[in-house]
Amino acid sequence: MIDINYLKAHDLILLECISGSRAYGLDTPTSDTDIKGVFYLPKPHYYGLHDDYIPQISNATNDVVYYELGRFVELLLQNNPNIMELLATPSDKILYKHPLMNHFKTEWFVSKICQKTFAGFALSQIKKSRGLNKKINNPMAKEKKSILDFCVVFDNQKSIDLKDWLTINHLDQSQIGLSKMPHSIHMYAMFVGDDFKGIINHDDANDVALSSIPKGLNPIGYLSFNQMGYSKYCQDYTEYWHWVEHRNDERYHNTLTHGKGYDSKNIMHTFRLLYTALDIANLGKVVVKRENRDELLAIKSGQFDYDELLQKADQLIKQTTLAFEKSPLQEQPQYYLVIKTLIEIREHLYS
């Protein structure tokens, strides 16, 4: 089995760097030490069957990750933010670098694609944060609502929630028979009897139940079912409780502590990506260590209001977009030169 220990024991590591907050200059006393690097596979694995190829190796917590040389180059050609930052790691954060890795020049890769990968990813994080903000500030009860909560009864020229109407009339939903009204959407005539199917047959029903109504029986009211509202509620309920089950509790409680209603660490990294994208457009290079440490850590500690940050992010996105439009950067990485160098490095490693 090839794991991190195997890579080190067989001298297969080509690059090993401190990454994350310590590379960005945003670490605090409680920050973890993340490691990223590059390795190459033993010759039998690389030349063997396709299933033998291992693109990435990490530890159980994913704070130590190594990319196989080919995967590393593939992601560089895509201007992947994590890998572009790995290539541009400041020298004081490089733990080991094989001389062959110096053959890859950062300027071969930096291109206008970075606008999509850096700024585009930051924009997706803002959208994600908006959704998270909604979840934090609009918690959903664990007890799931039913169709009955989305029904209204029209009785004596008045509308009343179905549950209230049933209570007032001392009726149970199982005593109600529904008949669909012609030329209408989700509107039903209501009848009372002991042989009807009720409004819902079971708790997991997705629609109201229809009953066979005897001729000559007069309706006691009319029911409207907000099916679209119920469908949207079910979707939101599923998404919310999936989020609760899988959320990072430490970051969630940090969010509650600063009381701003957003994931401050996520927002901080969103701004870091935007500032990095702006540097790429203006300077033509990836600047990993951020000079605006105080500003970014203030965001992380929740010192800004959520709407204020969104407004600032929107302005920064516009600024970045304009900078890339004016930038003399190449449209895409120098693919031929990169692949030629990759082949030469492979040949040297396996010679």
Image (spheres, rainbow, N blue to C red):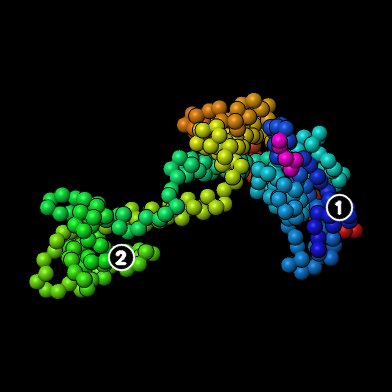
Q: Residue 8 carries which label?
A: 1
Which image quarter holds the C terminus?
bottom right
Q: Is residue 139 above or below residue 183?
A: above
Q: Whole-percent x and y of residue 210?
A: 25, 69
Which image quarter holds the N terminus?
bottom right
Residue farthest along the right direction in this orientation = 351
Instruction: Looking at the image, tell me whether mark 2 or mark 1 is earlier in sequence order.
Output: 1
Disc 2 is placed on an element classified as loop
Q: Does the magenta stretch include residue 31?
A: yes
Indicate the amino acid at tag 1: Lys
**Labels 2 and 1 touching (C-beta < 8 A):** no
Q: Let me know if residue 28 appears in the view.
A: yes
Indicate the amino acid at tag 2: Ile
Q: Is residue 162 above or below residue 176?
A: above
Q: Residue at x 79, y 36 (%)?
A: 93
Q: How many marks?
A: 2
Q: In this view, does 123 lie above or below 28?
A: below
Which of discs 2 and 1 lies nearer the camera? The answer is 2
Q: Whole-percent x and y of residue 104?
A: 78, 44
Left/right of residue 228 with respect to residue 299 in the rendered view: left
Q: Whole-percent x and y of residue 24?
A: 70, 34
Report crowding for label 1: few under 14, some 14 to 19, many 20 or more residues within 10 A (C-alpha).
Answer: few
Left/right of residue 242 with respect to residue 58 in the rendered view: left
Q: Main secondary structure of the magenta part?
A: loop
C-alpha gap between disc 2 and disc 1: 63 Å
Residue at numbered disc 2: 200
Report crowding for label 2: few under 14, some 14 to 19, many 20 or more residues within 10 A (C-alpha).
Answer: many
Q: Which residue is drawn at 20% across and 54% down?
A: 168
Q: Residue at x 23, y 55 (%)?
A: 167
Residue range in magenta is 30-34
